[in-house]
Image (cartoon, grey):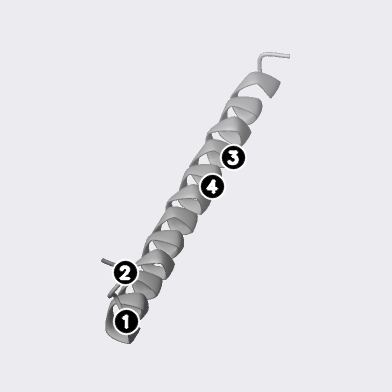
């Protein structure tokens, strides 16, 4: 049993790192996407005042 603990710990660490990377990439893509939409809206017409 003591030999199984380190493997589970490494698996959990790997999963956490992978999820962190995925969330970071998702946030980055969402940020860029929203930035593009805002820029497009500003260039098209922004006269709602």
- Residue 15, position as x, y percentages in the image: 59, 40
Badge nearest the viewer, 2 or 3: 2
Residue drawn at 40 percent across, 73 percent down: 37
Count of residue discs: 4
Measure the C-alpha gap from mark 1 to mark 4: 41 Å
45 vs 11, nearest the viewer: 45
Residue position marked by numbered label 3 in the rendering: 15
Which residue is the extreme one toward the top?
2
At label 3, counting other C-alpha atoms closer than 10 Å, the crowd grade (few under 14, some 14-19, many 20 or more) is: few
Labels 2 and 3: the sequence-earlier one: 3
Q: CA distance from mark 2 to mark 3?
A: 46 Å
Residue at the spot of label 4: 18
Judge left or right: residue 10 versus residue 2: left
Q: Quadrant of the N terminus?
A: top right
Determine the secondary structure under disc 2.
loop
Which residue is the site of mark 2? Answer: 48
For the residues marked 4 and 2, what is the alpha-carbon distance in whole angstroms? 43 Å
**Residue 39 % position (x, y):** 30, 76
Which of the labelled discs sits on residue 45, or is there none? 1
Contact (Cβ within 8 Å) of mark 3 with mark 4: yes
Q: What is the distance, in whole Å, between disc 3 and disc 4 at their CAs?
A: 5 Å
Q: Tag 4: Cα neighbours inside 10 Å, few (<14), some, or many (≥20)?
A: few
Between label 2 and label 1, give the one nearer the viewer.
Answer: 2
Foreground: 24 or 41? Answer: 41
Vertical placement of 35 versus 14: above or below? below
Vertical arrangement, residue 30 with respect to residue 43, above or below: above
- Contact between marks 1 and 3 (CB within 8 A): the answer is no
């Amino acid at each position: 049993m003591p030999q199984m603990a380190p493997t589970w710990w490494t698996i959990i660490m790997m999963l956490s790192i992978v999820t962190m990377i995925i969330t970071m990439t998702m946030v980055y893509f969402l940020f860029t996407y929203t930035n593009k939409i805002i820029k497009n809206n500003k260039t098209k017409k922004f006269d709602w005042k």
